[in-house]
Image (cartoon, rainbow, N blue to C red):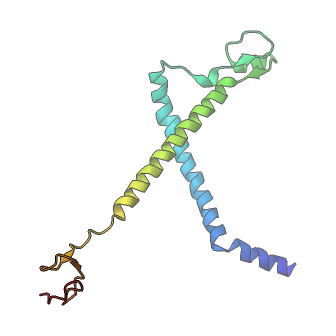
Amino acid sequence: MKKFLTDFKAFAMRGNVMDMAIGVVIGTAFGKITSSLVSDIFMPVLGILTGGINLSGLFYALDGQHYASAQEAAAAGAGTLNYGLFLQNVLDFLLIALCMFLVVRVISRIKRLRSAPEPAKPVRLCPYCRQEVAQDATRCPHCTSMLE
């Protein structure tokens, strides 16, 4: 049992396991932010643009009767096929995926700007043969002329 606990401790404390745990915690918190952005910002705007259509309220009563809401059908004992909730979840997923794509794209652009390569030093040419010469050379390796 002691060896098992020692092995488990070694496994749990390895760097990649700890990194993954931290990533899951941060991902969960970021998921809440993204979900709030979609449900509290994007969906109301999308509702205005689509004329107030509420997908989550769409359903089909399995007993063939017509009910004003899924709650009313459930109170009457009828089963419902809530396809509107499914469509709403698909739309939420697409908007969350779009948000994540935009965040990753901005972060990639920032990283690219920060790690821009240093401008290349100007090439030094031999004044006699016009061949490229090292910056600290005192003699041209091509024509053997003395350089200043």
Q: Which residue is painted at 71% across and 12% down in the image?
A: 67
Vertical relation: 94 (above or below) 111? above
Q: Residue furthest top?
A: 65
Quadrant of the drawing holding the N terminus: bottom right
Figure quadrant of residue 35? top right
Vertical relation: 108 (above or below) 148? above
Vertical relation: 30 (above or below) 92? below
Residue situated in front as seen by the camera: 81 or 125: 125
Quadrant of the drawing holding the C terminus: bottom left
Q: Which residue is painted at 66% across and 29% down in the image?
A: 86
User: Residue 29 location in percent, x, y?
Assistant: 56, 52
Q: Report whether residue 146 is seen.
A: yes
Q: Which residue is painted at 81% across and 13% down in the image?
A: 63
In this picture, residue 136 sits left or right of residue 148: right
User: Residue 49 location in percent, x, y?
Assistant: 44, 23
In this picture, residue 47 sits left or right of residue 112: right
